[in-house]
Structures are given as structure tokens and as C-alpha cells.
Image: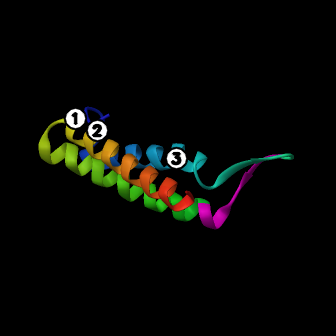
């Protein structure tokens, strides 16, 4: 995307897509009547995921490698899942 758009424009698009796809975790739920959007939870989750994605993009830009961002994503997911499961357990 960066070949056709500026770095900031392509980063905003990437972060927006990342945040939108993560609405499945919070914000969009399946009910007996179909899919339901939870506006407050969805908006909050969108903002948080957009910011996390911006951090990943920043790491990639600073390091010059996608692998640093992938490692950060793995660490983020492991930390979040461990915290959630320890809380539920």
C-alpha cells in the first residue's frame, strides 16, 4: 500500500482494517436473532485495537522488519490471553 499512498495514509488504513476485523472479539456478537453490534463496547474495542495496531506499525517502521511487529503481536496476545484465563480460572 505504501507504494501508492503515503506512509501515514497506508498506516491509518492498515490500523482501521486491523481494528475492524477485531470487532469479532468485542462489539459484534451472535444472538438467536442474528448478529448484534454493541456500540459502546465496539467503539471502545475499535479505539484500543487501532492504537495497538499503530504500535505494531510503529515497531515495523522503526525496526525495518515485520518480524519485530509479529513478535510484539505474539507477546501481546499471550499476555492478554494469559491474563484473561487466569482471571476466569
Q: Is residue 28 left or right of residue 44?
A: right
Q: Residue at x 47, y 43 (%)?
A: 17
Q: Position of residue 28 (x, y in %)?
A: 66, 50
**Residue 63 in sight in this render:** yes
The answer to which image quadrant residue 1 occupies is top left
The disc, 1 or 3, on the residue closer to the chain's N-terminal end is 3
Circle 3: element type = helix
Q: Residue at x 27, y 46 (%)?
A: 72
Residue at (60%, 59%) from the top-left corner? 42
Residue 29, x across and y down, in percent: 70, 50
Q: Is residue 12 visible?
A: no
How packed is label 3: few (under 14 Cα within 10 Å), some, or many (20 or more)?
some
Which residue is pictured at 25% across the width and 32% down the height?
Answer: 3
Question: Whole-Å distance between the Cαs marked 1 and 3?
Answer: 21 Å
Q: In terms of secondary structure, where does tag 1 sit?
A: helix
Disc marking residue 22: 3
CB under 8 Å between discs 2 and 1: yes
Magenta residues span 34-41
Q: Which mark is residue 18?
A: none
Q: Report the residue marked by disc 2.
A: 70
Residue 18 point in image, percent of width and height: 45, 44
Give 1 or 21, whichever is nearer the viewer: 21
Res 74 quadrant in image: top left
Residue 20 percent coordinates (x, y): 53, 47
**Residue that carries the numbered disc 1 in the rendered image:** 67
Amino acid at each position: 500500500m505504501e507504494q501508492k499512498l503515503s506512509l501515514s495514509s497506508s498506516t491509518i488504513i492498515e490500523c482501521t482494517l486491523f481494528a475492524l476485523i477485531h470487532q469479532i472479539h468485542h462489539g459484534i456478537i451472535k444472538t438467536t436473532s442474528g448478529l448484534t453490534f454493541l456500540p459502546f463496547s465496539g467503539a471502545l474495542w475499535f479505539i484500543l485495537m487501532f492504537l495497538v495496531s499503530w504500535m505494531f506499525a510503529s515497531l515495523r517502521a522503526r525496526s525495518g522488519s515485520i518480524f519485530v511487529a509479529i513478535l510484539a503481536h505474539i507477546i501481546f496476545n499471550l499476555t492478554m490471553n494469559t491474563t484473561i484465563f487466569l482471571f476466569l480460572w
